[in-house]
Image (spheres, coloured by chain):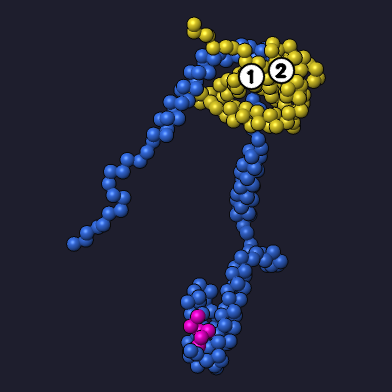
């Protein structure tokens, strides 16, 4: 089946890169490596993973303690400041728009409106009929399959 | 202030109860709708949805009063001055009897 431990005779150490490439997908090799080399190989994979994480973090970190600044020109600095404040302005607007819409005013005479004649039975029946027709129409919507959805291409 | 709101509602013909609701909650209630927070909540949701309807891209909601009609009674709802007024009225209209 494979030995539990070996000195890694299967791996060509001279050809292995010093800094492992984090983009390389190491998953398919894990199984075979583990069978062949056991402990040392899994430790190597862990090291590779660790190195990948460190590299990714280093790329994402902005070091604010860096004393030597990149040397932004005055106009570049102003441009960026303007860009950032516009972006913040947009975000502020969309955030404040999330507040619920205030109630519109339907009438200045609410008591009069509420005391007015109720909707007549005839109107209610007419609306019910229209709604029933609409419901019936919607429930009759269906797909009329005319052709096969999946066809075979015949490539001569 | 509540008396001014409710006085007019008390005098509505064949009313059996009313609610005055604001964004914060129920301001006044009486009759069959007294302390009826559940109905208040449901009606608020209904009226908010109805207020979103528009006819032909007009700016305001196309109605003055919303009626929720049941067999024997009706909830009549309107909005004025950031308050929702609900009145429960008897539905006395009868079908014409064909003899």
Q: Residue A95: in sight, yes or no? A: yes
Residue farthest along the top direction in this orientation: B99
Name the residue rendered at 55%, 13% in the picture: A120
- Displayed quadrant of residue A74: bottom right
Which SS does the magenta portion mostly show? helix
Q: Tag on residue B94? A: none
Say if A23 sits above or below A62 in the image. Answer: below
* Tag 1 secondary structure: strand
In contact (CB < 8 Å): disc 1 and disc 2: yes
- Residue B34 location (% of width, % of height): 76, 25
- Residue B1 location (% of width, % of height): 81, 19
- Displayed quadrant of residue A113: top right
Q: On the image, numbered disc 1 is attached to which residue?
A: B73
Q: Colour of chain A?
A: blue
Q: Tag on residue B16? A: 2
Q: Which residues are magenta?
A: A31-36
Marked residue chain, label 1 = B
* Direction from residue A66 to residue B1 in the image, left or right: right
């Amino acid at each position: 089946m494979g030995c539990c431990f070996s000195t890694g005779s299967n791996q060509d150490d001279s050809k292995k890169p010093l800094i492992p490439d984090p983009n390389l997908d190491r998953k398919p090799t894990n199984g075979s490596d583990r069978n062949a080399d056991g402990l040392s190989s899994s430790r190597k994979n862990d090291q590779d993973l660790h190195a990948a994480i460190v590299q990714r973090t280093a790329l994402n970190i902005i070091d604010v303690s860096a004393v030597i600044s990149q040397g932004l020109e005055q106009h570049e600095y102003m441009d960026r400041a303007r860009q950032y404040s516009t972006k913040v302005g947009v975000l502020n607007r969309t955030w404040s728009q999330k507040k619920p819409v205030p109630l519109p005013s339907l009438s200045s005479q609410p008591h009069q409106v509420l005391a007015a004649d109720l909707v007549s039975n005839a109107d209610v029946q007419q609306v019910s009929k229209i709604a029933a027709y609409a419901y019936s129409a919607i429930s009759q919507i269906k797909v009329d399959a005319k052709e096969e959805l999946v066809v075979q291409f015949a490539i001569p | 202030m509540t008396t001014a709101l409710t006085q007019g509602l008390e005098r509505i013909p064949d009313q059996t109860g009313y609610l005055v609701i604001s964004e914060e909650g129920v301001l006044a209630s009486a009759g069959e709708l007294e302390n009826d927070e559940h109905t208040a909540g449901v009606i608020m949701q209904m009226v908010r949805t109805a207020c979103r309807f528009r006819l032909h891209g007009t700016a305001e909601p196309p109605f003055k009063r919303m009626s929720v009609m049941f067999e024997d009674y009706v909830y009549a709802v309107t909005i004025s001055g950031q308050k929702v007024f609900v009145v429960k009225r008897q539905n006395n209209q009868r079908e014409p009897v064909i003899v």
